[in-house]
Amino acid sequence: MIRVLDSNIADKIAAGEVIERPVSIVKELVENSIDAGSNSIIVEIRNGGKSYIRVTDDGCGIPSDDLRTAFLRHATSKISSITDLDNIHSLGFRGEALASIAAVSRLTVVSKTDLSTAGSKLVLHGGKEISNETVGSNIGTTMVVEDVFYNTPARRKFMGSDAREAAVIIELVEHYSICYDNIRFMLINNGSTVFTTNGDGNKLNAITTVYPTREYKQLIPVNYANVKGFISNPGVTRSTRKGQLFFVNGRYVSSNVIEKGIEKGYGDRVFSGYPIAILFIEVDPSLIDVNIHPGKKEINFLNKEVIICNIADAITQAMQYKESIPEASARSIKRDHVITKPAEESKPLDIKDYLMNLDETVSHEDVTEPTRNYHTYEELSQSVREEVSENTYVPKPFEFNELQYKGYIFDSYIILQANNIVYILDQHAAHERIFYEILMENYLNSQQVAQPILTPVIIDVSSHVYNSDRSWMGSLTSMGYDIIDFGPNMFAIKGIPEYMKVSEAESFAMTFMENIDEYENNVAVVDKLIMKSCKSAIKANEHLSDMEVAALLDNLSKCKNPFSCPHGRPTFIKVTKYDIERSFKRK
Ligand code: ADP
Ligand code: MG
């Protein structure tokens, strides 16, 4: 028998599509508050939002006559006709959220507009009206949602632990707080304030309030074409992509196209892990496939290559700044945001624990940082804000000609200074970078004339190599080698690439030949072979004369990417005068 479902059941089914778990409720309520033009939004949750969610705003409010209507399915004030659909500026427009939330919870709303003298309070249980009365209230709206899924036990089972549900809600509110930096967000979890942003319209302030760790206050600004935001220098990475947040046209999205752009932009400067990147991208809405399903955030770009290139260029450009050189104390952030760790799932989130962990990390891992004890979250955020303002910079491009040579240590590191920053250059990494770029360029241009050497270097090879197809010899020739067959199982090098010492050229060629099993005459393979062989070409702890240091710097300055070796290790690290003074507790 075919039956039309009664509206109560139909509502619950529809609600299930919009409301999957407590975080979906928080998302809808916060978006409504943003759409209402609020300056301040308070989000409070208990038990991961399962037992209690409150969102209070100071927005336009809902007129008492409309209050009941707002909870009907497809009730929206945001669009009125189909033509409006092409011109949506609000976050919501489907008119489904409030009806769905009300259907699966006990909901209380108090709202007042600036035109009315009193507010209204409406209570709905499972969508059924319990009471509707006039009350005193401020302008704005408060929604309290209790006992989520109390009337749909099957759904209740699919919720995670309190800590897990809280973690995703906290993450969500973090994203809105960063994106809407002109709104003051306050987040309260089980009675403790997690953070309060100041809504001053400064993105970096919002970011450092939400993520009050050292790595975030040293982010480098990105501002290029349609891409703005902040990134970490390539020495500061995390083991997951959790530090990468993308907002397209004001919406938090996930996108592997954007991730590709970031990877391309950092290129080989990242040695391991994922740098922090918080990017705000503006794209003509007709060039993106906006997925209007309320729960989804994956975005599709029609012109992926353009997006990848823009992001890569934006990052490459930001990387020209001194700030992109890793600090002497920089380290990978081993610890992901504590509150999202699976290990934390079993116990309720405790902000004090979180802060204690933070303190331990700071004092044990980071020698340049004097031990600090913050008793409250506010103290911690305050101190971060102070540091941010003390350290406020205008990023400047890195200039080789500003560098003054200050010394040479451990037969490996060159000490240089530019104004208030001391740079330590790893001669080994620098050499690798220089050789790699020269040899790669020679290979690609094939115009190289070898520099003759007085006594040819004889290289013994296995008969396997000797009897191989000799196409690899052509690659070495284009790199600047003059190499000939010298009888059974031997080759003679009569000329070597410019800038290389005989010993270096010899080791390079030997490694190259040892690996010709991998050889194919294409850029990717030769690139890999050059990278591998460069590494063995350079002898560790080889003392450089002053002239050699000068030549090294000169050659490095001509490199396309002087900041890392081909394997992604940094060539430079830096220590600021400020860091030094702080270590001596003068600051
Ligand atoms: P939508 O956001 O898609 O319009 P909702 O069901 O989320 O649908 O909300 C229905 C209507 O209720 C909105 O169009 C808006 O007019 C009103 N509303 C909801 N929340 C608020 C709020 N916090 N402040 C003012 N108006 C609100
Ligand atoms: Mg809505």
Image (cartoon, grey):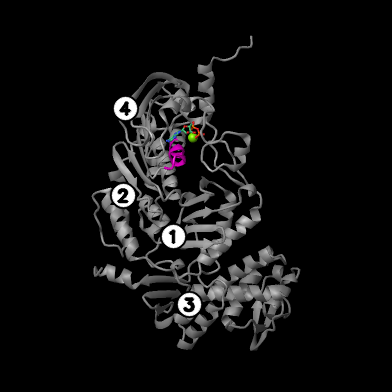
Amino acid type indicated by mark 4: Val
Question: Helix or strand or loop: what does disc 1 sit on?
Answer: loop
Q: Quarter-wise, where is residue 88 in the image? A: top right
Could you give the CA–CA distance between mark 4 and mark 3, rounded to whole angstroms? Answer: 65 Å
Name the mark nearer the viewer: 3 or 2: 3
For mark 4, give the secondary structure. Answer: strand
From the viewer's perspective, tell me whether residue 498 is left or right of residue 117.
right
* Mark closer to the observer (4, 3): 4
Can you identify the residue that label 1 sits on? 236
Which secondary structure is most common in the magenta stretch? helix
Q: Amino acid type of disc 1?
A: Val
Tell me how far mark 4 sits from mark 1, CA to CA.
Answer: 53 Å
> Is the residue marked by circle 4 packed among few (<14), some (14-19), or many (20+) residues within 10 Å?
some
Whichever of callouts 2 and 4 sits on the residue coming sooner in the sequence is 4
Name the residue beneath numbered marker 2: 357
**As rendered, which of 441 and 450 lies closer to the eye?**
441
Compared with 424, 72 (above or below) is above
Ranked by sequence position, the earlier of labels 4 and 1 is: 4
For the residues bearing labels 2 and 4, Cβ distance under 8 angstroms: no
Residue marked by disc 3: 399
